[in-house]
Amino acid sequence: MSSAAPVTDTDTPPPPLPPLHRLPVTPAQPPHPTTLPDGTPAWLVTRYHDVRQVLGDPRLTRTDLHEVGTAGSTADVAANPASLFNQDGPAHRRLRGTVQKAFTPRAIAGWQPWVAAAVQQAVDALVATGPPADLVSAFTRPVPFAVTTRLMGLDGDGPDHLDERRLRRWTLALLAQGGEPAADHGETLAEFTAFTEELIERRRRAPGPDLVSRLVRAADQDGGIPPDALAFLVLGLTASGNESVTGALGNALAYLLGERPEHWPRLADPGVTEHTAERLLHFIPLGDDEATVRRAAAAVELGGVTIPAGAVVAASIGSANRDPAVHPEGLDADLARPLDAPTLAFSAGPHYCIGAWRVRLEMREALHRLATALPGLRLTVPIDRLDWQLGSTTRSPAALPVSW
Ligand code: HEM
């Protein structure tokens, strides 16, 4: 480490962060060498078809990459070797198979009515309270929290009850990234892990209709699922599942209300909402990190380049989703049009996001019901003046002041 600190002008405030839809991405081009923020040499892959190949190729693994890629501390959600994301090959397939048994299309269809009800309840409360309002505290936080706690069976009384402040504290520890970890970081995560392990034991003894019970039953039937992998799965689905929906909703609302007010009332049409939600998930990233990383277990031909065995490959999903050869229309196009090719926002191949169904469902219900009730909703601060919630893997508005 250098002992000489860089000279900074402390009177000049740092430039405001751009909203995530305006975050610059590396333009699509052939794979080329780069250096990750933590100094690791890597191959940067940016074209849509090349990124799709990286995400789907079993020779590109997550082996020993838990700590690679980010400047400053890496979030526990990415760094924990027990996480589903950090498994490869047979161990990964076994755990995914167990998850798949819990997330059947029938189970997901059964969850839809109460997701819609949770959204409608938040919309009704907002309308009843009247303007002005902050959409983060009144909508983008309570809606995913209601869905998460109902899905995981944490909305009742007794030892399983989870209140929003406790989940928030645990989540901020799990997703903390970049700076120095907080003094009580390890203690907070240990508390969350103990809660999750006890929850799993209670659901094993007395199962219910919730997702935790379904996961425990599937894991026990399949066998061979390490207890720490099951616990980390439940913990991740609860905390980062919840936070990512809050982030996606907040960033989507910032863009729609801040940049596309003419489109907002059109979301009363469910068909328009379906394509709009997909376009927003496709074009607006969840955070500032550019790439997802893999290790080449063997030499791989990629986009006309040979990536040597052992090299780190950094796939930029943001660049791929904006590759003009595949997605000629950018975010500014008509938001009611379907995408030209499937989005890579939820990855592709073995690590495809297991929460994609939940994000799509909640995003559609939320945008459609809010726009139907409040077609005149508008931001009351310029989009360039929004404050951001920082220090974690995701970035989203700290507040969204609105009126109608
Ligand atoms: C807008 C919100 C979300 C986005 C953009 C997103 C995106 C992604 C992406 C890109 C990956 C794979 C990364 C890679 O291949 O390198 C992934 C994996 C994963 N996601 Fe999501 N996600 C979101 C929300 C959620 C939610 C709500 C849940 C849970 C309910 C979830 C659970 C997971 C899990 C468990 C994995 C690991 C899958 C595996 O490794 O097999 N995600 N997500």
Image: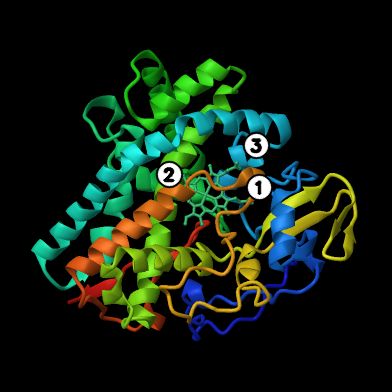
Asked whether mark 1 lies closer than 8 Å to ligand 1, one says yes
Asked whether mark 2 lies closer than 8 Å to ligand 1, one says no
Q: Residues within 10 Å of mark 2 (few under 14, many from 20)?
A: many
Q: What kind of residue is marked 1?
A: Gly
Q: Residues within 10 Å of mark 3 (few under 14, many from 20)?
A: many
Question: How far across and down, in percent of the image, does residue 302 sit?
Answer: 83, 60
Q: Secondary structure at mark 2?
A: helix
Quarter-of-image position of residue 106: top left
Taking 284 as reference, is 350 above or below it? above
Give the residue drawn at x 65%, y 37%.
Answer: 81
Label drawn at residue 349:
1
Q: What kind of residue is marked 2?
A: Ala
Residue at far left of view: 128
**Disc 2: which residue:** 239
Taking 54 as reference, is 261 above or below it? below
Among the two numbered marks 2 and 3 on one chain, the one whose residue lies closer to the N terminus: 3
Among the two numbered marks 1 and 2 on one chain, the one whose residue lies closer to the N terminus: 2
